[in-house]
Image: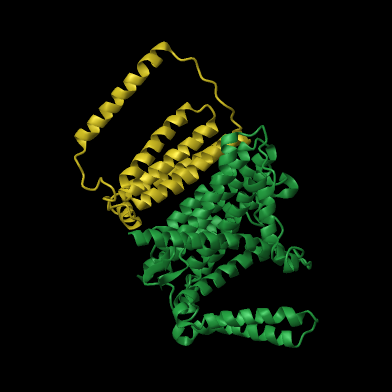
Chain colours: A green, B yellow
Amino acid sequence: MDSFIVISLIKIFVVFGALMTILAYLQWVERKLIAHIQVRPGPYRVGPHGLLQPVADVIKLITKEDLVPPYVNKTLYLAAPFLAITLALLSIAVIPFGPKIQVAGYQTWMQLTDLNFGVLFILGVSSMGVYGIVLAGWSSNNKYALLGGLRSSAQMISYELPLSLAIAAPLLVSNTLSLRKLVDTQDGWLWNWNLFHGFQYVSFIVFVIAAFAETNRVPFDLPEAENELVAGFHTEYSSMKFASFFMAEYANMITVSCMAVLLFLGGWVAPWPAAYGSGYVPVAIFGVAGVITIWRGLNPRRSRDRFTFPPFGVVFLIAAAVFLVPLLQSALLPLFWFCAKTGAILFLFIWIRGTLPRFRYDQLMGFAWKVLFPVAMLNLLATGLVIAMSS
Amino acid sequence: MDLILFLVFAGLAVVAAINVVVQRHPISSAVSLIAVMGSLAVLYLLLGAEFIAAAQVIVYAGAIMVLFVFVIMLLNAGGETKAGRSFVASLLGVPVLFALLAMLAYSTARIYPRDPEVHFGGFRGGTAEAVGRALFTTYLLPFEITSILILIAIVGAIVLARKELE
């Protein structure tokens, strides 16, 4: 029992630390990617290629003056950002990143806690998440904030329906509500993934679209449309209170990407069995990257490449070697696949932000109720029918 | 541990429920109601009814209360003023309340015998599987009738909204 508490505490620290770092750097990745999509360098001043920009941002946000406007409803105004960030971080607790591993004699899952209704837990937490935004909008006592809060609550209620229906279809296929078992049913080859199971790609598309709306991302970021609503629901917030809304948005993005990976993309399992060499993919990727960077460093195009490329090459080669250690493989390989898949979905989020314009508000609601909801409903019915016929 | 959690969340539910009535502003009342719903979900969870707890959060605390808050925000309802109280109500209110609570507790204890399923984690019918089976076998007719009832309510709401447009 004691060791359980100790292990859980260690896991919480590791997951929390990793999540916070990823949150900060996801924002850097996003700014860089969008900058490159728009043919500009992006953050470049703080650290090499702006790599220390997240640190600078955190320091800036912490040291900023924390204003509380006199006309706000104080209790709810202070509670709203707290609620938003708590609920956003809560759902990461049930997400499994990998299978059971053995650390110093203790067997433990790469997951904080397993609930046999994990999917429902995440749905519940995400349905509560809207309160942070709504109460922030209302308690600010500002018409732009109120409009942002109203828009966001209407949008989140509307898109939660197709989202839940799209989640239900792969759950029918896998016949479980536990996130661990969900991954177990998708083990083996690529075509065992729920995405390639029959017509489940329809659920996947509906899920991704609804997820964009739930996380208030472009093209559904009407709640914070800056050219009509200043900054939407967080207009009146400054310093760390603003930062917690910001972090909540990115944490929700990560949770939703993890859900997409677990539900449709097979979680931490490799696209093909280890017997056919899927365990050597990370070694190959890092090895090739290391060889290329070292070769580029030895035949430099620019004079400074001679000094900057070889260190990266060595780091890549070390990473490749780490993936060859049999003791670490059982933990690192699932983590690699999980991160790769989640990263791909997160890239999709950013890519779309850099590509698509914003919806008009009536189009947004019309699209949810007249297109997405019927499609999700029909998809669920058809999935149920196919499963009933085949069993 | 179970007992501590029960006391904390049962207490929170009661305090928040009283707060719903005491608060003057509709939004504060609604937020208290959300706290009541959330604590009830924890109580269900303590009993072992995990699916019902999740449904409680998703449906009541999540969906229905968001609509409440949404409507309050949309109407921009301000704080209520307290009506003048009658002398009899303030004098008799508390004793009558306790008498009613005592009657409720007594009759519950009389009618319902001690159930082995009613203790922490003892309820077995609370998984998604068990609830689904009960809904689609034992309670199929009420379930279907409820769905038709809700459909009628939706149609009614649309008809009412349409009339106002014309």
Compared across the picture, whether A129 is left or right of A63 comes to: left
The quadrant in which the C terminus of chain A is found is bottom left
Compared across the picture, whether A155 is left or right of A6 comes to: right
The quadrant in which the N terminus of chain A is found is bottom left
Residue A37 seen by the camera: no
Compared across the picture, whether A229 is left or right of A99 comes to: right
The spot of residue B18 in percent (x, y) is: 42, 30
Tell me the quarter of the picture where residue B41 sits. top left
Q: What residue sits 55% from the left and 63% below the top?
A: A18
Q: What residue sits 41% from the left and 11% below the top?
A: B87
Q: In the image as oriented, which residue stretches furthest toward the top? A: B87
The spot of residue A70 in percent (x, y) is: 67, 32
Query: Which sits in the foreground, A335 or B122?
Result: A335
Residue B87's place in the image compared with A304, above or below, is above
Tell me the quarter of the picture where residue B36 sits. top left
| Labels in figure, total | 0
Compared across the picture, whether A2 is left or right of B70 comes to: left
Residue A259's place in the image compared with B5, above or below, is below
Residue A208 seen by the camera: yes
Query: Which sits in the foreground, A366 or A278?
Result: A278
Query: Which sits in the foreground, A360 or A150?
Result: A150
Tell me the quarter of the picture where residue B35 sits. top left
Q: What residue sits 24% from the left and 48% below the top?
A: B117
Query: Which sits in the foreground, B150 or A305?
Result: A305
Q: What residue sits 52% from the left and 54% below the top?
A: A89
The spot of residue A37 in percent (x, y) is: 74, 67
The spot of residue B120 in percent (x, y) is: 28, 48
